[in-house]
Amino acid sequence: MSQEQPRREEAIKYGDVFNVERELGSKAVAPVDAAMMQKAETAMIGKTEKGGAAATMQAAALKNERDGVVGHNDITQVVAQSGVSVTESDLPGRQVISESVGGQVVHTLEEKERNICKLVEVVEQFGQKVASNTTMPSSLAQDLGSRVGGGITIGEALEATVLTAGKKAVEWSDAAAIQAAEVRATGRTNIVPGGVAAAAQSAATLNARTTKDEDKTKLADVLSDATSKLPSDRPATRRDAEGVTGAEMRNDPNLTTHPGGVSASVAAAARLNQTNNN
């Protein structure tokens, strides 16, 4: 009686993790490919970016090597011939970093996305400490680097809140903080029709009448793509952070702010901008 042969795991190919064409899509992601992209990404950005091409390739190559479908020193022929690259382009009003494998772009990252990712990292690491006089480690400040346009904007801080507290139901304290942030970003004293503050106030009103938490409007529903809903935007300052924090606390029954909430994100942005300007 013949024994069943052990099933051989299928390799994770470039076409499985990236939108690529031609020969590259059918090739297994190899360890040396991933190492080359990590080196290129670190040289451009200063580290391996979460969700970037290097991280994706490393995860795929590690599994391929673990499953025995590639060797530790293997390199894809396309990569050996055409290499990998990480380039930065200045487009009207924005910066874009493009990561390519074998001449094909596999991942792009805009400056706004980088700012938001770094801001989320700080909020998660330091929480409410960012709003105090706690000194940020110089290594982290250097890693954040300089920013075009003067720093992380208030709109970007609002979008970061989607990742740090997006599942939180919108309350009056959140609506007040968002309104304070919008006023400071736009310079207007009135609420922008159809803007984030108007949406937050409507959500808080509806949530107060809603019994089930799963039926309530969440911060992510209100703040997703917040920068596009602001008629104007500007880098967050310490005074902005104080104003937003005060608004959130005054409208909270316990006179506190929510960890990772709106005021925490704006405070983190202000702290990073102040550190980079020193």
Image: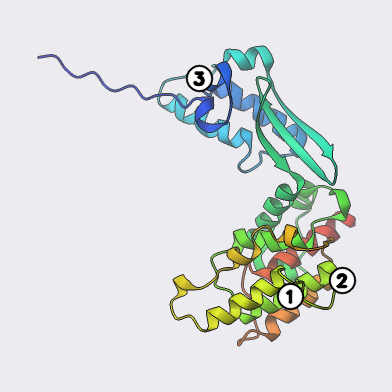
Badge number at residue 13: none
| Secondary structure type for disc 3 | helix
- How far across and how far down the image is residue 151, in percent? 83, 55
Reading the image, the residue beneath label 1 is 179
What's the CA distance linking mark 1 and mark 3?
A: 50 Å
Q: Residue at horizontal 47%, vertical 27%?
A: 12
> Who is closer to the viewer here, 225 or 115?
225
| Secondary structure type for disc 1 | helix
Is 163 rendered above or below residue 12?
below
Mark 3 nearby-residue class (10 Å; few <14, some 14–19, many ≥20): some
**Do we see residue 269 in this rendering?**
yes
Q: N-terminal of the two: label 1 or label 3? A: 3
Q: N-terminal of the two: label 1 or label 2? A: 1
> Who is closer to the viewer here, 37 or 244?
244
What's the CA distance linking mark 3 and mark 2?
A: 53 Å
- Residues at marks 1 and 2 touching, judged by CB atoms closer than 8 Å: no
> Who is closer to the viewer here, 209 or 90?
209
Amino acid identity at mark 3: Ser
- How far across and how far down the image is residue 182, in percent? 77, 70
Q: Quadrant of residue 6?
A: top left
Badge number at residue 187: 2
What's the CA distance linking mark 1 and mark 2?
A: 12 Å
Would residue 28 be found to the left or right of residue 90 on screen?
left
Q: Residue at horizontal 46%, vertical 74%?
A: 213
Amino acid identity at mark 2: Gly
Question: Colour mode?
Answer: rainbow
- How far across and how far down the image is residue 124, in percent? 63, 60
